[in-house]
Image (cartoon, rainbow, N blue to C red):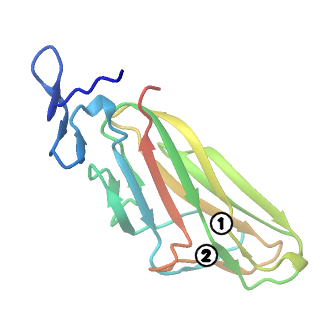
């Protein structure tokens, strides 16, 4: 025999609402420790061009799809500064294009923590593989909730003096950066 408990609010021992329901099946988690926030997803809305060969450049990811706690700066520093301490899943992709069609090339996307590279994804290729590359990366990192910040960089090496672009698009989200706090970690 099954039991049914009906309630519109679940409280802790101090009377704080942990979970509430509107009576139509929509549940709201009220306890911060149970939320996977701060969370954000942002993308590059137009191309970032004229970047020199073998140059590590911060990607100016400028358009937020969502930002739960206002922790992503999409206009000045292009960085995520979480306000809650914990472990975070961060992920990024840099879609790069070079006019170079000869020589071995390599491209990478890097996630920086506090100004230093903490994660890198690299693709090496030859001419037959094409000229548009999209390395992506995800990593779990610790954040202190006060001063740690995270940014995305990209680099392309064509073994010549070509320039490259980081491709952005307002509908296809070719280059992006996102993350969320992991609960229970």
Helix, strand or loop status at disc 2: strand
**Above-or-below relation of 112 to 6:** below
Q: Dividing the picture into quarters, in which one does residue 124 lie?
A: bottom right
Q: Quadrant of residue 157?
A: bottom right
Q: Residue at 43% x, 26% y: name it.
A: 184
The one of 183 and 63 positioned closer to us in this rendering: 183
Q: Quadrant of residue 108?
A: bottom right
Residue toward you, 116 or 32: 32
Position of residue 41 measured from the top left corner of the image (x, y, whole percent):
42, 59
Q: Give 21 or 98, whichever is nearer the viewer.
A: 21
Q: Give the x, y percent position of residue 81.
A: 36, 46
Q: What is the tally of numbered marks visible in this picture?
A: 2
Are the two marked residues, 2 and 1, in contact with CB atoms closer than 8 angstroms?
A: yes
165 horizontally vs 114: left or right:
right
What number is the disc on residue 40?
A: none
Task: Report whether 77 appears left or right of 128.
Answer: left
The single residue placed furthest to the left in the displayed view is 15
Q: Is residue 166 above or below residue 88?
A: below
Residue found farthest to the front: 1
Residue corresponding to mark 1: 55
Local crowd at mark 1 within 10 Å, few (<14), some, or many (≥20)?
some
State the quadrant of the N terminus: top left
**118, above or below 105, in the image:** above
In percent of width and height, residue 83 lies at 30, 39
Q: Nearer the viewer, residue 130 or 25?
A: 25
Name the residue rendered at 88%, 81% in the picture. 102
Q: Dot 2, how many residues are within 10 Å of its Cα: few (below 14), some (14-19), or many (20+)?
A: some
Label 1: which secondary element: loop
**Residue at mark 2:** 51
Q: Residue 178 at x, y = what percent?
A: 47, 55
């Amino acid at each position: 025999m099954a039991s049914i408990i009906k309630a519109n609010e679940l409280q802790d021992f101090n009377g704080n609402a942990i979970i509430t329901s509107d009576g139509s099946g929509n549940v709201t988690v009220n306890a911060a420790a149970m939320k996977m926030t701060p969370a954000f997803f942002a993308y590059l809305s137009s191309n970032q061009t004229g970047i020199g060969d073998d140059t590590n450049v911060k990607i100016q990811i400028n358009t937020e799809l969502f930002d739960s706690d206002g922790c992503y700066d999409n206009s000045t520093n292009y960085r995520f500064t979480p306000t809650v301490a914990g472990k975070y899943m961060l992920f990024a992709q840099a879609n790069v294009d070079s006019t170079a069609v000869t020589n071995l090339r390599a491209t990478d996307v890097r996630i920086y923590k506090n100004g230093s590279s903490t994660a890198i994804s690299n693709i090496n290729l030859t001419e037959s593989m094409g000229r548009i590359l999209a390395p992506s990366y995800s990593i779990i990192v610790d954040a202190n909730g006060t001063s740690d910040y995270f940014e995305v960089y990209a680099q392309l090496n064509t073994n010549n003096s070509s320039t490259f672009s980081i491709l952005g698009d307002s509908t296809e989200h070719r280059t992006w950066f996102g993350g969320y706090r992991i609960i229970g970690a």
